[in-house]
Image (cartoon, grey):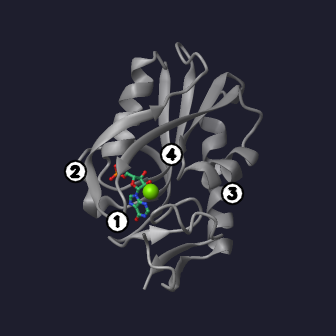
Amino acid sequence: MAQLDRSVEVLISEQEIRRRVAELAEELKPCLRWADTVAVVALKGGMVFASDLLRALPPIGGVDFIQARSYGAGTSSSGSVELVTGPQLDLSGRSVLLIDDIADTGRTCSFLRDHIASLGARDLRLVTLLDKPSRRTHSVDLFRTGFVIPDRFVVGYGLDLDERYRNLPYIGALI
Ligand code: IMP
Ligand code: MG
């Protein structure tokens, strides 16, 4: 159980996130045929980012969800990834935008990517809100990312520590 009384230092403010998400949407707009694209949102961490990003994009062909588990309790990785829920839509031959919270070691993103590719996606692009490249052990082909961050454990805007802090409107670090 996480301590209940830890304070959070703001690393990326609500305003900075809003600005960058709008910018990302503009960068993405010309890159995909949106009416033929399915957004696959990686739960649970990707949900807040995805809900803001998707509303800034053109009308899309579909939205679905995928969930993998890689972290146990706390801030260290359990070392293995398993699929909890897969997408329900048929992705074969579809263009897919995979939306995740963070590429940390990269293990989860690569796992999700491989899984979606195995379902027959034709054109698969990965977008994350955050990129922590200093911790990478598995290479990930990030099409776009919101912010490159240093090696600190962050919470908020979808990201949790033992399920807490997900609904903070900013990205923070525990102090
Ligand atoms: P991976 O190490 O890239 O496989 O990251 C797996 C998952 O761990 C991510 O999708 C996040 O949900 C979570 N995670 C990684 N780094 C952080 C962090 O700094 N804060 C909160 N969750 C994190
Ligand atoms: Mg987590």
Q: Residues within 10 Å of mark 4 (few under 14, many from 20)?
A: many
Q: Mark 1 and mark 3 in contact (Cβ < 8 Å)?
A: no
User: Between marks 4 and 1, how big is the CA–CA gap?
Assistant: 22 Å
Q: Which residue is mark 3?
A: 22
Q: Which residue is mark 2?
A: 137
Residue 117: in sight, yes or no? yes
Q: Earlier in the sequence, mark 4 or mark 1?
A: 1
Q: Mark 1 and mark 4 in contact (Cβ < 8 Å)?
A: no
Indicate left or right for 46 with 55 as reference: left
User: In the image as oriented, which residue stretches furthest toward the front?
Assistant: 1
Q: Earlier in the sequence, mark 3 or mark 2?
A: 3
Q: Taking 10 as reference, is 18 above or below it?
A: above
User: Between marks 3 and 4, how big is the CA–CA gap?
Assistant: 14 Å
**Which numbered tag is attached to residue 14?**
none
Of marks 4 and 1, the one in the foreground: 1
* Residue at x 54%, y 49% (from the top left corner): 44
User: Between marks 4 and 2, how big is the CA–CA gap?
Assistant: 18 Å
Of marks 4 and 2, the one in the foreground: 2
The answer to whether the beta carbon of the residue marked 2 is less than 8 Å from any atom of ligand 1 is: yes
**Which numbered tag is attached to residue 75?**
1
User: Between marks 3 and 1, how big is the CA–CA gap?
Assistant: 30 Å
Indicate left or right for 109 with 39 as reference: left
Secondary structure beneath label 2: loop
Type of the residue with mark 4: Val
The answer to whether the beta carbon of the residue marked 4 is less than 8 Å from any atom of ligand 1 is: no
* Residue at x 55%, y 28% (from the top left corner): 96
- Please identify the quarter of the rendering in which residue 65 is found: top right
Q: Which residue is mark 4?
A: 127
Q: Position of residue 37 (x, y in %)?
A: 63, 26
Q: Mark 4 and mark 3 in contact (Cβ < 8 Å)?
A: no
Q: Earlier in the sequence, mark 4 or mark 2?
A: 4
